Image (cartoon, rainbow, N blue to C red):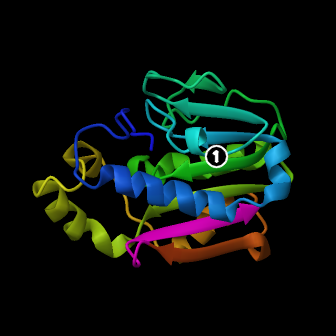
């Protein structure tokens, strides 16, 4: 059995590898097999694109403000500041799937509408955007878990906003996604939210 040797987040947390595996599993479950012959972009993947290294797509792309570390050869990595409010460096309708796993809680809410518009622009018709984020009520719990070294204190300290399902729906709508093609749910015992939007 292969052991993961890459840092999955900044800082340390005893259960961070397990949480990364659960996020990757949930995202993989939410992406239809028919889309996997296209390209996927993992937005805010960190310095090591764990999810992309554990999924199957014809083309794999990653984007983050951190420099890449130990990048698998089949992944194209782009450095980009997601809080910059500038267009994503990709053509219209380039991707069949996009993921934002444990990302939006780290971003300035003021830039999210434009970021969602950009995801809509670069996603092909009928493509999917998959998002995960901690449930809004978990803020104190996550801080306690960070003090116990269960999750990364660096990551938790950088959470700037917490989201509810209706608020995520509003952002999808503001980004141009049809609300009847947006779906939501919970995972990890209700600690995290997942959301998908089809273009």
Q: Residues within 10 Å of mark 1 (few under 14, many from 20)?
A: some
Q: Which residue is mark 1?
A: 55
Tell me where residue 112 appears, x and y as whole percent.
55, 50
Query: Which image quadrant: the N terminus?
Result: top left
User: Is residue 199 shown to the viewer in this render?
Assistant: no
Please tell me in which quadrant of the rendered image residue 52 appears: top right
Whether 126 is drawn above or below 154: the answer is below
Q: Is residue 156 magenta?
A: no
Is residue 76 shown above or below 156?
Answer: above
Q: Nearer the viewer, residue 36 or 174?
A: 36
In the displayed structure image, the side of residue 2 where residue 156 appears, left or right: left
Residue 35 seen in render: yes
Q: Residue furthest left?
A: 147
Residue 129: x %, y % from top left? 69, 55
Residue 59 percent location from the top left of the image: 76, 33
Instruction: Tell me: 86 left or right of 108.
Output: right
Determine the residue positioned at 54% across, 27% down: 80
Viewer-nearest residue: 69 or 117:
69
- Residue in view at x 43 percent, y 47 percent: 108
> Is residue 3 toward the left or the right of residue 26 in the image?
left
Disc 1 element: loop
Most distant residue in the right direction: 125
Quadrant of the frame with the C terminus: bottom right
**In this picture, is 78 found above or below 22?**
above
Q: Position of residue 50 (x, y in %)?
A: 49, 40
At a point 51% along the width and 36% down the height, the residue shown is: 49
Q: Which residues are magenta?
A: 188-199
Residue in view at x 31 percent, y 51 percent = 16
């Amino acid at each position: 059995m292969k052991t993961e040797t890459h840092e999955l987040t900044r800082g340390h947390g005893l259960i961070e590898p397990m949480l990364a595996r659960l996020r990757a599993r949930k995202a993989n479950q939410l992406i239809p097999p028919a889309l996997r012959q296209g390209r996927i972009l993992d937005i805010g993947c960190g310095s090591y694109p764990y999810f992309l290294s554990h999924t199957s797509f014809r083309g794999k792309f990653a984007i983050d403000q951190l420099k890449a570390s130990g990048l698998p050869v089949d992944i194209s990595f782009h450095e980009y500041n997601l809080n910059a409010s500038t267009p994503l460096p990709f053509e219209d309708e380039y991707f069949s799937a996009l993921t934002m796993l444990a990302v939006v809680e780290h971003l300035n809410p003021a830039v999210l509408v434009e970021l969602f518009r950009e995801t809509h622009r670069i996603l092909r018709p009928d493509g999917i955007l998959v998002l995960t984020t901690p449930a809004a009520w978990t803020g104190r719990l996550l801080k306690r878990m960070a003090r116990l070294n269960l999750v990364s204190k660096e990551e938790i300290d950088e959470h700037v906003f917490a989201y509810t399902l209706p608020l995520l729906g509003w952002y999808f709508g503001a980004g141009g996604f049809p609300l009847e093609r947006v779906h939501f749910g919970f995972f990890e015992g209700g600690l995290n939210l997942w959301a998908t939007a089809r273009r």
